[in-house]
Amino acid sequence: MKKKYVIAYDCGTTAMKTVLMNIDGTVIGDAGAGNPLIQPKADCAEVEPFVLWNNICLTTKQVIYENHIDPEEVAGIVFVAHWKNIIPVDKDGNILYNSIIWMDARASVQAEKLNKEAGFFVGTGQEYWPRLMWLKENEPEIWDKADRIMGLNTYFKWKATGAFVTEPSDDFIHSYNPKMQEHYNKILDAAGLTEDLDKFPPIAPATEQVGGLTQASATEMGLKEGTPVFGGFGDLVAITVGTGCCSENAVHNYMGTSSWLVQLMKERKENYAPQWFTFDARYEGALFALQTGCMAFDWTVEQLYHAERKTMGGDVFDLVNQEVAEIDPGSDGLIATHWLTGELPPLAKNAKGMFLNITSAHDRRHMTRAMMESLCYTHKKYIQQYEKYTGEKLSSIRIVGGGSVSVVWMQMMADILQIRVEVPESPKYTGAIGAYYCVMVGLGEIENYDAIYDAVRIERSFEPRAEYAPLYNKMFDVYQKLYPALKEIYDELNGVY
């Protein structure tokens, strides 16, 4: 029987999206489920891996049933998941602790110790290795029982096939790059983790088939035993591939629960990007991340449009966009910060959201627009860093993710950045589309990622309006001054972490 379909699983921080695609890349249908976030303390963030796996199984059955698909016709499946999860599993396959996810910042004491021992700045209490140290120091019994330490992508593949293997973007133990491997070795030694390396999975290319569905997993998912499972990758790589921005110095912008600007480079540059990820054996990704992206927008809508959201559901966003469009650029002098969960350096985890310069003349429309503008200001800062490094002025940027479907927001972004904004078709599915290309390379249907850029179809473009540049430049300059002015106040209010 001819294989006609690919199933991609896009596991975000707060939601699971299972996308069924034709072999030509056309989205046929999807199903979603919420991923409950567990936050026992302000600096903690966990998920239950079994709940996420159950979401995968339920949504797979749903898309198969609703679209009348014969499971025999599925050519392959692939998982996309957020990075830097820590899931300890014993030798019998039992999960010993909830997954400690990328948002978690509990390991500040360990981070301070690691930075001192390493002799250079490794990261904050949110970084991967300090969180490993926290688990080892604070839950020694669990650490000792842990036969394997998995990330989410690894966990999903292990559940599906029994294979214990990771992929380049979610591996912080191994690297294809000798310089990076040397760097990792220094960190692991300083963290006291060298003796534990056998707990971590080996690395394999994202496009490699890691195995086929076991009988048990196939039954749970409603698919056929032996269905090929490919390596997949983290959401950062998936979205990069989905935008087609896969060449050196290519950049894109993502507007999801979290948000980011990504630039691909052959080598990492010290003191350039706040974070990095490995794209593949060729490139490293410079990651300029907003920890709280569209989550801040969603929070604002929930607070200010609560009654309408209860009655209108998802249609409330049409109302929000309509009302925001009624407010002039700059929100009549109102500035917001989107830092609801804190941010990475040069900001801080203890920096939180605010509205500045609010008056009785402002209403919810101004507040919502100001929050949307704040995300654009942060991305403007990062694009300025990119242009200073490359010496090139960007003429356009591709933006994807849920926020990119807002015409008002994308025009706002073009006006603040003063460059053309391009939104590809199906921007909410970009991660799944990137996963589709991963399967196509794995199946040998396309040679590599290089040809994807021209294949991506642009649905909408937004040209910058020069008349708003002076106003937005003024607002941006003020926005830049906020954290330095408030740093000591945040330290006093929230403590230093």
Image (cartoon, rainbow, N blue to C red):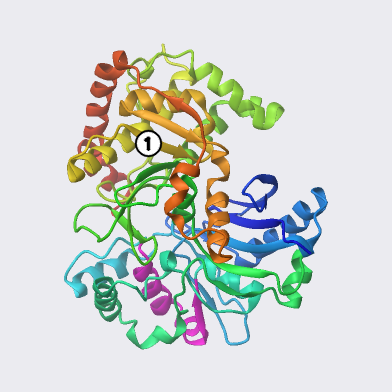
- Give x and y (percent) for residue 278: 36, 63
Which residue lies at the image location 49% right of the left edge and 16% below the top edge? 325
Question: Does residue 162 appear to the left or right of 455 in the view shown?
Answer: right
- Give x and y (percent) for residue 160: 65, 72
- Position of the N terminus, as image quadrant, is bottom right
Which residue lies at the image location 41% right of the left edge and 79% below the top edge? 136
Q: Magenta part mainly helix, strand or loop?
A: helix
Residue that numbered label 1 is attached to: 397
- Give x and y (percent) for residue 357: 32, 21
Which residue lies at the image location 40% right of the left edge and 30% below the top edge? 421
The residue range painted magenta reads 127-150
Question: Does residue 287 appear to the left or right of 209 in the view shown?
Answer: left
Question: Does residue 294 appear to the left or right of 51 in the view shown?
Answer: left
Q: Viewer-proximal residue, 181 or 349?
A: 181
Does 180 lie within the magenta span? no
**134 shown above or below 415:** below
Does 135 lie within the magenta span? yes
Find residue 109 and report its image quarter.
Answer: bottom left
Which residue lies at the image location 26% right of the left edge and 65% below the top edge? 122
